[in-house]
């Protein structure tokens, strides 16, 4: 069975952030142009706000229709949760059916049910795709399917969940821009969808509408799909990455893409890894966090806005008691030992949650919750 989600769980989208608190309640903050904060406020459910000055919240606000959740995921401009009764609910942008409700409305600014889903244990979101892991260890996805990212053997989009073929022993799921991956209970990985830069890890650059096995990895502890790259934590506490490396997000000291996993040098005793838009962050057993790749407005947390690209891991400054970190497209957040949340990087729409819209290359506290 899938391991339980952490008590405090982060989910970062393109320019919004959400957290599941210890009591299961949800708080979201940042950009709200398509209703992705889920509190029922404008914009109206007819069109996303394209004014250039969309509604934002620079501090966390509650999602009132979700008193308790068991897991949370955030995509480009949508958010989803699983609930204690095994159902799933989503809100935000829905032009490609990425809310899974059976409709292709422009958006929903309050939670709607994902059609037909019961016994869901985990949820993950990507650019225009949502997926759930069910208690029977199968995976079901919905939304945009043009690159095979639904994994059901077709390249047709679906506004209701469809089952990912050949997977019935999954314990973890993750969704990137146009690809998704699952970790199986034997430690191997399967990925499907877009593969133009090798993000599926099968030694090719061919898209696949069915899951393919990631080369070389037989002992994964966790997996994370970024925009167009993927990373895994292995049982020996090392980190391996593959796919797009245009900004050094594979952490291998170069900008050369790789269609197969490559070990990130000099990272040992690691406890977790998470991939963002074009950067990656990982946590170490000593509580430090390390990031590499594109440094958009301080997204690497190094204390500096320059250089714009870092090809090897560098330590996130000031904090040495992280339990986990989550990378968004241009910002990142981490949960500390006391369950407080600190964020850094791009803050154009208040996605750091500290009451400002000022970018920060150092971690700042989000809240209050």
Image (spheres, rainbow, N blue to C red):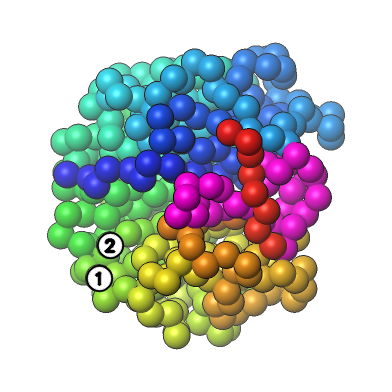
Picture quarter with the N terminus: top left
Label total for image: 2
Which of the two residues, 120 or 320, is positioned nearer the viewer here?
Answer: 320
Residue 42 sits in quarter: top right
Which of the two residues, 18 or 185, is positioned nearer the viewer here?
Answer: 18
Residue numbers of the magenta segment: 333-361
Which residue is under mark 2?
221
Check contact, mark 2 vs mark 1: CB within 8 A: yes
Which residue is under mark 1?
235
**Horizontal and vertical percent for residue 26?**
50, 29
Decide whether residue 317 is among the magenta residues. Answer: no
Residue 52 sits in quarter: top right
Q: Is residue 242 above or below residue 256?
A: above
* Picture residue at 74% right of the left edge, 57% below the top: 360
**Horizontal and vertical percent for residue 187?**
20, 62
Magenta segment, principal secondary structure?
loop
Residue 243 in sight in this render: no
* Picture residue at 19% right of the left edge, 41% below the top: 137
Picture quarter with the C terminus: top right
Tell me the element at label 2: strand
Q: Residues within 10 Å of mark 1 (few under 14, many from 20)?
A: some
Q: CA distance from mark 2 to mark 1?
A: 6 Å
Q: Residues within 10 Å of mark 2 (few under 14, many from 20)?
A: many
Question: Which callout, 2 or 1, points at the residue further toward the start of the chain?
Answer: 2
Residue 366 sits in quarter: top right
């Amino acid at each position: 069975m899938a391991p339980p989600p952490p008590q405090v769980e982060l989910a970062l989208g393109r320019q919004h952030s959400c957290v599941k608190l210890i009591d299961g309640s949800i708080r979201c903050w940042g950009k709200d142009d398509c209703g992705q904060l889920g509190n029922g406020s404008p914009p109206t459910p007819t069109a996303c706000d394209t004014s250039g000055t969309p509604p934002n919240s620079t501090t966390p606000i509650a999602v009132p229709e979700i008193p308790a959740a068991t897991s949370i995921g955030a995509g480009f401009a949508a958010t989803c949760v699983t609930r204690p009764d095994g159902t799933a609910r989503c809100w935000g942008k829905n032009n490609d059916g990425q809310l899974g409700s059976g409709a292709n409305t422009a958006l929903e600014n309050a939670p709607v049910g994902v059609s037909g889903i019961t016994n869901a244990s985990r949820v993950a979101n990507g650019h225009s795709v949502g997926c759930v892991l069910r208690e029977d260890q199968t995976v079901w996805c919905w939304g945009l399917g043009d690159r095979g990212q639904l994994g059901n053997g077709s390249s047709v989009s679906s506004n209701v969940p469809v089952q990912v073929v050949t997977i019935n022993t999954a314990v973890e799921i993750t969704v990137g821009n146009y690809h998704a991956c699952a970790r199986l209970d034997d430690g191997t990985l399967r990925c499907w969808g877009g593969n133009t830069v090798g993000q599926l890890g099968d030694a090719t650059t061919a898209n696949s509408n069915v899951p393919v096995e990631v080369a070389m990895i037989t002992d994964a502890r966790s997996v994370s799909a970024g925009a167009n790259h993927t990373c895994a934590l292995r049982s020996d506490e090392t980190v391996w990455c593959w796919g797009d490396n245009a900004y050094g997000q594979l952490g291998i000291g170069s900008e050369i893409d790789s269609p197969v996993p490559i070990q990130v040098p000099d990272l040992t005793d690691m406890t977790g890894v998470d991939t963002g838009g074009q950067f990656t962050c990982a946590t170490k057993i000593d509580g430090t966090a390390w990031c590499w790749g594109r440094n958009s407005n301080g997204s690497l947390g190094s204390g500096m806005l320059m250089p714009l690209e870092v090809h090897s891991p560098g330590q996130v400054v000031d904090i040495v008691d992280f339990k986990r970190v989550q990378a968004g497209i241009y910002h990142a957040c981490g949960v500390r030992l006391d369950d407080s949340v600190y964020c850094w990087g791009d803050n154009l729409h208040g996605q750091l949650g500290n009451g400002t819209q000022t970018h920060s290359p150092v971690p700042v506290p989000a809240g209050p919750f």
